[in-house]
Image (tube, rainbow, N blue to C red):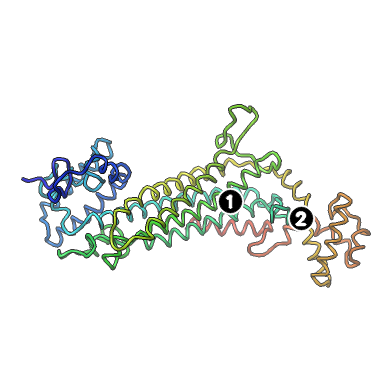
Amino acid sequence: MTDQFSKKGEAWSARFSEPVSDLVKRYTASVFFDKRLAMFDIQGSLAHADMLAAQGIISAQDLADIERGMAQIRAEIEAGQFEWLLDLEDVHLNIEKRLTELVGDAGKRLHTGRSRNDQVATDIRLYVRAAIDDILVQLKALRSALVDLAERHADTILPGFTHLQVAQPITFGHHMLAYVEMFGRDAERLLDARRRVNRLPLGAAALAGTTFPIDRERVARTLGFEDVCHNSLDAVSDRDFAIEVTAACSLLMMHVSRMSEELILWMSPRVGFIDIADRFCTGSSIMPQKKNPDVPELARGKTGRVFGHLTGLLTLMKGQPLAYNKDNQEDKEPLFDTIDTVIDTLRIFADMATGISVKPAAMRAAALQGYATATDLADYLVKKGLPFRDAHEAVARAVRACDSAGCDLAELPLERLREFSDLIGEDVYAVLTLEGSVAARDHVGGTAPNQVRAAIARVRAQLAG
């Protein structure tokens, strides 16, 4: 039989009068990074072959031969024995060439009714769908670890900041739940994006569809797609789904970076709110006393890397005419690296959350330094009948007096406090304590410990569902 490939492996060699140069082969080849799509390529090819046989386009024997050959190829890849050839350019031609070696003409018939254009679009969607599912598992683990940490510190006082200045007392548990909410939104975004990922391009062929009587819905069902792509031009050239997932990952990493920044600040001896387990830190080659929070620092840096991939993908697509263009070979490396980075980061952060040690005394001391209960005093006066703006002014004068005296509001004698408003009574000291302040925020979303515990119960129910 005549091999459809040339001696060097090109599937289109009969069209050209000279071989592709070695430099061009290296420049245009993708096999050494897109080979990670191999199992998805096999999965898609088997579904395509099943449909071709069901439609009478290939024989039952061809299907059996293709399935047998693909099983062997899968085993060779899993054992690390598959030979990836640069001359064959990409994962698709490498697998097809090996299949033809193993089963002959049946391997050649597999490509009936499809193109590498719709084939690669299908492979990438299968890969991204699986990656989303993996990321969601890691997000769940991280959220669960943060909920555990929040529950242990539902009552632990922490200064809340605005402008990096002490603002009002909150609890450390409430603060951790803010990140639980952020990562929850990340999960929602990825789940929503998954619906648009989960549409089948196969059947669009090169760009216009195929003359063969294919059944795209059958392939979609076999591969677990919810729908097919409804325009053949869009099916092969669309990379919105990859950009959307990278955008969702960028938001996710932005949340990781914000958390990293706080962990780094809190671990500094100048702040001393927390410590991070040694296994997530490194020392210095010259300063023996150093303990550096390398994991959150590196995650903060890797966030910029993921942002760069998003910008790269948007730029890649912005000037492309319909339909498929070779530019799209450049979509894979940034997408792959984004997903690898996110999964590794989430996995290590879930572990690191179990190694965070909280220092309640340092947190409490810091909360007492910035007149954190000033707003509580203003609210107290409003409840006594003073208009809020007048209450705000009275408390501002009291804070200025404390600033001069070097004391906290709660340390001022009652007679001194009454100089700022005669509405102040002995009951004022109950609202000037840190515990009284956080307990007073007793509503959904508030920092009161019982509300923190209610929020924890709500999130645990979500995670269990």
Asked whether, in this view, residue 407 is left or right of residue 440, the answer is right
**Residue furthest front in the image:** 17
Which quadrant would the N terminus be assigned to in this image? Answer: top left
Q: Report the label total.
A: 2
Judging from the image, what secondary structure is the residue with disc 1 in?
A: helix
Residue 102: where, in percent of width, then height? 14, 42
Q: Amino acid at mark 1?
A: Arg
Q: CA distance from mark 1 to mark 2?
A: 23 Å
Q: Is residue 290 above or below residue 361?
A: above
Asked whether, in this view, residue 131 is left or right of residue 68, the answer is right
Residue at 51% across, 51% down: 253
Per the rendering, the mark at residue 372 is 2
Cβ atoms at labels 1 and 2 below 8 Å apart? no
Residue 128: where, in percent of width, then height? 37, 53
For mark 1, does the 10 Å Cα neighbourhood hold few (<14), some (14 to 19), or many (20 or more) residues?
some
The residue closer to the viewer here, 320 or 306, is 320
The residue closer to the viewer here, 179 or 394, is 394
Per the rendering, the mark at residue 258 is 1
Q: In terms of sequence position, does the residue under pointer 1 or pointer 2 come before the other?
A: 1
Q: Is residue 355 above or below residue 164?
A: above
Judging from the image, what secondary structure is the residue with disc 2 in?
A: loop
Q: Is residue 195 above or below residue 175?
A: below
Residue at 67% across, 40% down: 268
Residue at 84% across, 52% down: 408
The residue mark sitting in front, 1 or 2, is: 1
